[in-house]
Each structure stands twice: as C-alpha cells, then as structure tokens.
Amino acid sequence: MATKKILIVIDVQNDFITGALRNEEAIKKLPNIVNLLKTERFDETYVTMDTHEENYLNTLEGSKLPVKHCIDGTWGWHMAEDVSKTKAIQNAEIYKKPTFGSVTLAQHLWTHIFNEDYANAKNYEFTIVGFCTDICVVSNALMLRANFPNNKIVVLRDCTAGVTPETHEAALKTMEMCQIEVI
C-alpha cells in the first residue's frame, strides 16, 4: 500500500487572522495555506475549529486569555473565506473543539486507521498546518504523536503561525524534540 497522506488544518479561523486575536504572522502565512489546499496532494483532510460559547470569559481558558474569540457561529469563528472555498476544505471532516487539542479528531483517526486499516497503519503520514503553533497546533501534534508513535508527522513552518514569533519557534522546537518533523 502506498503511503496515505492526511492533512490536518488547525484553527484557520478569522479571529486568529484579522479578528479578535489579530496576528500579522497568520496574515502572512494564510496564502501559503490556501496554496497548499489547492494542490490536492492529500488523500484526506481534517479540520479543527476552535469553538467557544458566549460564556467563554467564565471558563478557565477565558480567565487566562480574557479575549472573547471563536464564539460559535460568529464571523470570527468561521474559517478564512479563501480557505473555506477550497475543494479540500469543502470535502473535509470538521471537528469543533472547546479547548486546545481535539480529542475527538485524535480518537476518530485512531479508530479509523487502527480498526479499519490496521495492517497498513504505518503507511499513514500526517501533515499539520494552522494557527496558533504554540497552543493549538502543538497540542494536536502531540496528541497525534501519542496515538501514532510509528507514523511520520510533519508540521509545515511556512503554514503555521504562533502568538509571537518567539513562541512559534519554541513550539516548533518542542515538536522536533518529540520526533515531529518541521519543514
């Protein structure tokens, strides 16, 4: 079996680009993500969407990051328009997540691959792109590493952005230390 290529798109949402948590690095990297999505070089695409409720400021995360963002159904919660228009995203499975890592996505992938394709499980390769490298990207990458210890996991440096350039680089280094390839 040829290697099956899986793309994981983490939180490419308006609030992380030009909205409540505006990020100049995300603005710069967004075209790279759009171009990657247009290549159609992946067999499957999965998407996470940071999803909070109106009571966000009353949550633990809201007390540590007191900026309302990605409130379900708002403009800021939606994916960037250029991203949502791609065929890859239109055909993707989307996972809303109330916290940094998507347990549901990791469970789905583990069940899908190991229950349905156990003999070929090592022939899956994961590529991760999105925002915020230092919070949600690293959380999801480490969940994948924990569930798929023998699979190649790649994070694309030019298709990720952190809260700051320094924390972005620190997260990339952390992922490298956990045997996640950063290219």
Image (tube, rainbow, N blue to C red):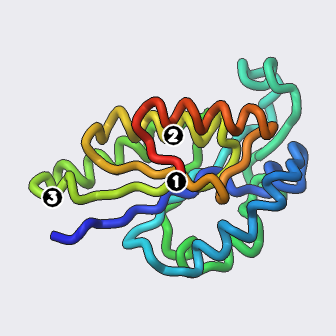
SS label for mark 1 = strand
- Marks 3,1: beta carbons within 8 A: no
Marks 3 and 1, how far apart in space? Answer: 21 Å
SS label for mark 3 = helix
Marks 2 and 1, how far apart in space? Answer: 9 Å
Disc 3: CA contacts within 10 A as few (<14), some (14-19) or many (>=20): some
- Marks 2,3: beta carbons within 8 A: no
Label drawn at residue 128 = 1
Task: Say what amino acid the circle numbered 3 marks.
Answer: Asn
Q: Is residue 30 above or below residue 24?
A: below
Q: Earlier in the sequence, mark 2 or mark 3?
A: 3
- Residue 174 in view here: yes
Label drawn at residue 120 = 3
Q: Earlier in the sequence, mark 3 or mark 1?
A: 3
- Residue 74 in view here: no
Q: Quadrant of the C terminus?
A: bottom right
- Marks 2,1: beta carbons within 8 A: yes
Label drawn at residue 55 = none
Q: Quadrant of the N terminus?
A: bottom left
Q: Position of residue 103 (x, y in %)?
A: 45, 37
Please tell me which residue is depicted at 69% across the width and 48% down the height of the picture. Answer: 131
Please tell me which residue is depicted at 57% across the width and 71% down the height of the picture. Answer: 89
Q: Is residue 114 above or below residue 90?
A: above
Q: Position of residue 97 (x, y in %)?
A: 58, 42
Marks 2 and 3, how far apart in space? Answer: 22 Å
Disc 1: CA contacts within 10 A as few (<14), some (14-19) or many (>=20): many
Disc 2 marks which residue? 140
Task: Say what amino acid the circle numbered 1 marks.
Answer: Ile
Disc 2: CA contacts within 10 A as few (<14), some (14-19) or many (>=20): many
Looking at the rendered image, the disc whose residue lies closer to the viewer, 2 or 1, is 1
